[in-house]
Amino acid sequence: CGHEYTLANLRFAAHVDGANPAVASKLAWAQRTACTVPSTIAAEREHNPFMRVENPRVAQAAMAADVPGPPAPEGGAVEVMRRLREMKNAFRGPSHLKLSQ
């Protein structure tokens, strides 16, 4: 199955956008599935915060985060992406995180 990062990535997605039912559903599925790869771009667009930088909830969470580094000169979605990357780099969320639906 290769390297399995899905649970860690979904825990981060839940931290960023816990109100997203697609994240909750995918996390519940991943917790009971041994091998979660491959995925599709369409599926990733539903739950992956890095592919949802223009979503208002994702952007709000990213812009509210205290992250290091200077802002991206381009602003907008580029700054949201930069902040998400910094947030993910520092994220040490609980391994048992589950979302209520």
Image: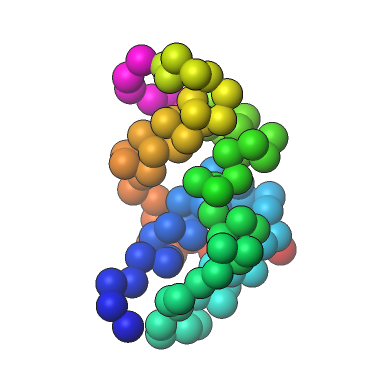
Q: Is residue 9 above or below residue 52?
A: below
Which residue is farthest left?
Answer: 3
For residue 21, what is the image quadrant? Answer: bottom right
Image colouring: rainbow
Determine whether 76 is above or below 100 in the image: above
Q: Is residue 20 left or right of residue 2?
A: right
Q: Is residue 35 magenta?
A: no
Compared across the picture, whether 15 is left or right of 3 comes to right
**Segment colored magenta:** 64-70
- Where in the figure is residue 93, as x and y percent of width and height? 39, 51
Q: Quadrant of residue 58?
A: top right
Q: Residue at x 60, y 45 (%)?
A: 52
Where is residue 40? Give x, y as percent: 55, 69
Q: Looking at the magenta stretch, what is its main secondary structure?
A: loop
* Count of marks placed on residues: 0
Can residue 65 be found in the magenta stretch?
yes
**In the rendered image, which quarter contains the C terminus?**
bottom right
Locate residue 56 relative to residue 41 in the image: left or right.
right
Q: Position of residue 65 (x, y in %)?
A: 48, 27
Can you say which quadrant of the picture contains the N terminus? bottom left
* Residue 37 placement (x, y as % from top left): 43, 76
Measuring 39% from the left and 60% from the top, which residue is drawn there?
8
What residue is at 64 percent from the left and 36 percent from the top? 54
